Image (tube, rainbow, N blue to C red):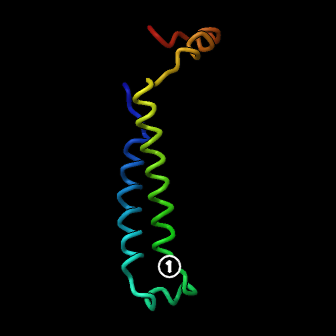
Amino acid sequence: MNFDLRLPLGLIFSLFGGIIAVDGALSDPPAYAMSLGINVNLGWGLVMLAFGVAMLGLALRARRKGSCPKSLIPKIKDLGHDPLP
């Protein structure tokens, strides 16, 4: 099975981070007066968006290169496990 958890995580974090960042960018400044004037939605939305984009990039890079580097196969065989039946 070739399932990479970074792909759905990247999609979810990118989607939610983008929604929260847009909401923070379009909100009124008096709305975040309770948070000491810091626009928390914009800040954390951008952090979530950056994390999601990073996860998507890593997932796409792994998909392009293959899931298991060939250099690890001899090391795994030395441990007594056969990764390729």
Q: Is residue 41 above or below residue 8?
A: below
Q: Residue at x 39, y 69 (%)?
A: 20
Q: Secondary structure at mark 1?
A: loop
Image location (x, y in percent) of residue 60: 40, 36
Image location (x, y in percent) of residue 36: 58, 87
Q: Quadrant of residue 81?
A: top right
Q: Is residue 77 above or below residue 23?
A: above
Q: Residue at x 64, y 12 (%)?
A: 79
The one nearer the camera, 34 or 70, is 70
The residue singled out by tag 1 in the image is: 39
Image location (x, y in percent) of residue 67: 45, 25
Question: Which of the image's four quarters has the N terminus?
Answer: top left
Judge left or right: residue 42 versus residue 12.
Answer: right
The one nearer the camera, 8 or 60, is 60
Q: Quadrant of residue 73?
A: top right
Q: Is residue 35 above or below residue 3?
A: below
Q: Residue at x 43, y 23 (%)?
A: 66
Image location (x, y in percent) of residue 38: 54, 81
Q: Is residue 4 above or below residue 49?
A: above
For the image, the number of numbered tags is 1
Question: Which of the image's four quarters has the C terminus?
Answer: top left
Q: Residue at x 42, y 76 (%)?
A: 24
Q: Amino acid at mark 1?
A: Asn
